[in-house]
Image (cartoon, helix red, strand yellow):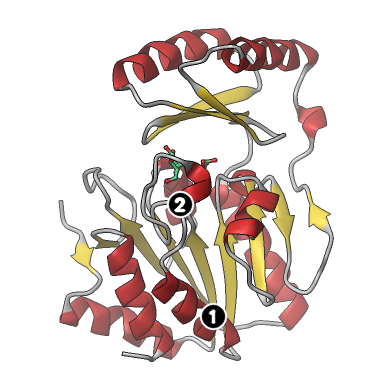
Amino acid sequence: MNKKYALQKKYFQELNEKILRAENILFFCDYDGTLAPFNPVPAKAKALPESIKSLRLIAEKENYYLSLVSGRKLSDLKNMIQFENANYAGSHGLEIELLKDNQIIHPFQAQNIDQKSKEIYQEIKEKYQAESQVELEDKGFGIALHFNDEIMQKEISDEINKKLQSTNYQLLVGRKIVELRPQGWNKGKAVNFIAKKMVEQFSLNNYLKIYIGDDRTDEDAFKVIEAGISIYVQNEDDLNTEAEYYLKDPHDTAKLLELLAGEA
Ligand SMILES: O=P(O)(O)OC[C@H]1O[C@H](O[C@H]2O[C@H](CO)[C@@H](O)[C@H](O)[C@H]2O)[C@H](O)[C@@H](O)[C@@H]1O
């Protein structure tokens, strides 16, 4: 493991130099586990106020384009964190709202999902809606099952995985959660989609992508950051990540954002 702790002076200087060399910054930030510490009740998982304050300052910088990217559905994400001048990507990027544009874009269409897959998905959804030991979060484009018990999580994810064989859905296993979502779209594709839109809309030339995220779904985004800055927020997991830098938890995210906002 050869990751760079982003708050260590020499590594912060290194990433800050990259930022200073770029004319424009496309700043992508995940929500849960990155801005908001874990809470067993998703609705209570609030972003740290100091991170909100710094992100607001970052979003106001003339050459910064802030995007919030989450597995949460768009409306939920926008309820949790409200910025006028930010792009939003909910449901792992299946629902996108670009800054200063009130329409929701669905960059990946449901017709890519065949009838058989839809039926199996519906069957799984109904089964776990009726299961009292599992909390089902219906996101429209997919579902998340929240668990308290890791053994149960493993059993259920194995069972669902079997059912999803040769469907157009995929299963993602995360921290106390399994998620079913359509195959073919992910946070990496959403990052590229938003980046392209920003480049076109604002005629950007020299730009740098920054992505901060904490779980497996963020790995797809780290892979498309290229020469930019990818930062993994470690939480409980190990450092098996594509990201170049790491932070230890959302409190570290707050410290980094404060430095980047120029407050510290
Ligand atoms: O992409 P993210 O912003 O990181 O969202 C990922 C999922 O986050 C939420 O679930 C996770 O956080 C909850 C609050 O701390 C926690 O209760 C749950 O166990 C975690 O898995 C959210 O509920 C999901 O919809 C997101 O996909």
- Judging depth in this view, the residue of 29 and 49 nearest the camera is 49
Quarter of the image with the C terminus in it: bottom left
Q: Can residue 52 be seen in this view?
A: yes
Percent x, y for residue 134? 48, 20
Please, is residue 90 above or below residue 163 in the view?
A: below
- Judging depth in this view, the residue of 54 and 98 nearest the camera is 54
Please, is residue 220 above or below residue 149 in the view?
A: below
Residues packed near mark 1 inside 10 Å, few (<14), some (14 to 19) or many (20 plus): some
**Kind of residue sitting beneath label 1:** Arg
Residue 216 figure quarter: top left
- Residue at x-position 21% and y-position 44%: 238
Please, is residue 200 above or below residue 196 in the view?
A: below
Label 2: state its secondary structure.
loop
Residue placed under numbered mark 1 in the picture: 56
Percent x, y for residue 63? 58, 88
Residue placed under numbered mark 2 in the picture: 45
Residues packed near mark 2 inside 10 Å, few (<14), some (14 to 19) or many (20 plus): some
Query: Does the Cβ of the disc 2 residue fall within 8 Å of ligand 1?
Result: yes
